[in-house]
Image (cartoon, coloured by chain):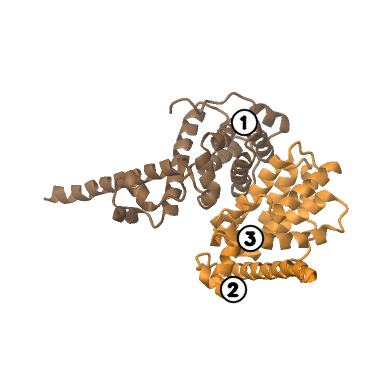
Chain colours: A orange, B brown
Amino acid sequence: MAQNRTDSPSRQERRKARTRAALIKAAQSVVAAGRLNAPILEITQAADVGMGSFYNHFDSREQLFRAAVDDALERHGNRFDEWSACLDDPAHAFAQSFRLTGRIHRREPALSQVLFTFGLAMAAVDNGLARRASRDIDRAVLAGRFVVPDTDLAMVVVAGAVLCLGRLLHDQPERDHATSTDHVAQTVLRMLGMPGEEASEICQRPLPSLDDPP
Amino acid sequence: MAQNRTDSPSRQERRKARTRAALIKAAQSVVAAGRLNAPILEITQAADVGMGSFYNHFDSREQLFRAAVDDALERHGNRFDEWSACLDDPAHAFAQSFRLTGRIHRREPALSQVLFTFGLAMAAVDNGLARRASRDIDRAVLAGRFVVPDTDLAMVVVAGAVLCLGRLLHDQPERDHATSTDHVAQTVLRMLGMPGEEASEICQRPLPSLDDPP
């Protein structure tokens, strides 16, 4: 009995986690389809959970979408970390992740769109990509690669550039997203204290392919 | 009769403009009070117009809020233009307007809040402040003060920095907004091609007071 009592909450926790994951996955499909006005009922049906279960986990559709976007950004962040694990230079790691982040706007336009539709990324300043960028800046400062007196203020420029770049690429579909992203990345590296020529060189290095399976 | 026929639409246009202005003014009060969930009925009552009139002008509350924010930014932009009219150096004009814009976040927290609640500013890339900043950058490039190969990409960093600075000041109420804004302004000036020492000096110059009556 004692064993059962200990197990029960854990089983319940696992069931709750599964329900939450199903809702997030369904929301990601809805977001990817650009259907930001989809009724909650449609999302719960796609997730195969009841309406009551929805409200056990989220207060609103917006809150679910935010969780779905956070989850997607976290997964991207994990991939970026794997790719930069083999790099000795934290400034190179920062630049590589920034350049890959910019490329996501065209690759996942729906994810990008939801960021400015709900202003989610601005709310979620501790999202998976922003948190890692901030960490990489601190590492590069310690390694003497960046000169940044205030990481939070540097992140204002870094995060703002990523978000507004998404908006620009959305507004100007003919614009080359790779060239534009790398140009902004260079600008950001100079802002972080890197000499112009080196910033230019580091932004021309080959990138891992987002097409490769994670 | 012919005269009447010409006048009538004009009178109607004026009435429409008054109704629209009343709705925008009411929306600005609602936004300033932080009541972003106020029902449309409450806004139309405050504006003393009928619900039908609302839908003649706007499709949704969000659209009205966007117009209200655009109107507020346009008024700020007009003031900034008056203040910079006497400056010979377009780089100084750009820096002054940027530093004043940053200060609006603390001065008008509700206006600032609405930008990231609805992500409006990201949608309205041609808002009154962004449009003027872009114009000032082009002028400073022509005057040989900035080196900017692509104004749209420079604006990605400028607009992003302004928006995310607002978010940071909101999240960190103890942070000195003037010092932080001027630090970001310096960073942005360096990014636009100005030498570091000059960027620092230009961001320490006295500013017009936002408290002065327009």
Residue at 50 percent of width and 48 percent of height: B126
On the question of residue A176 being in view, the answer is: no
Q: Earlier in the sequence, mark 2 or mark 3?
A: 2
Callout 2 and callout 3 share a chain: yes
| Numbered tag placed on residue B178 in the rendering | 1
- A144 or B167, which is in the foreground? B167
Q: Name the spot of residue B70 as percent of width and height, x first.
A: 45, 45
Q: Nearer the viewer, mark 2 or mark 3?
A: 2
- The quadrant in which the N terminus of chain A is found is bottom right
Q: Name the spot of residue B20 as percent of width and height, x first.
A: 34, 47
On the question of residue B114 being in view, the answer is: yes
Q: How far separated are the C-alphas under marks 3 and 1?
A: 34 Å
- B193 or B78, which is in the foreground? B78
What secondary structure is marked by label 2? loop
To which chain does the residue with label 1 belong? B
Residue linked to disc 2 = A49
Residue at 85 percent of width and 42 percent of height: A142
What secondary structure is marked by label 3? helix
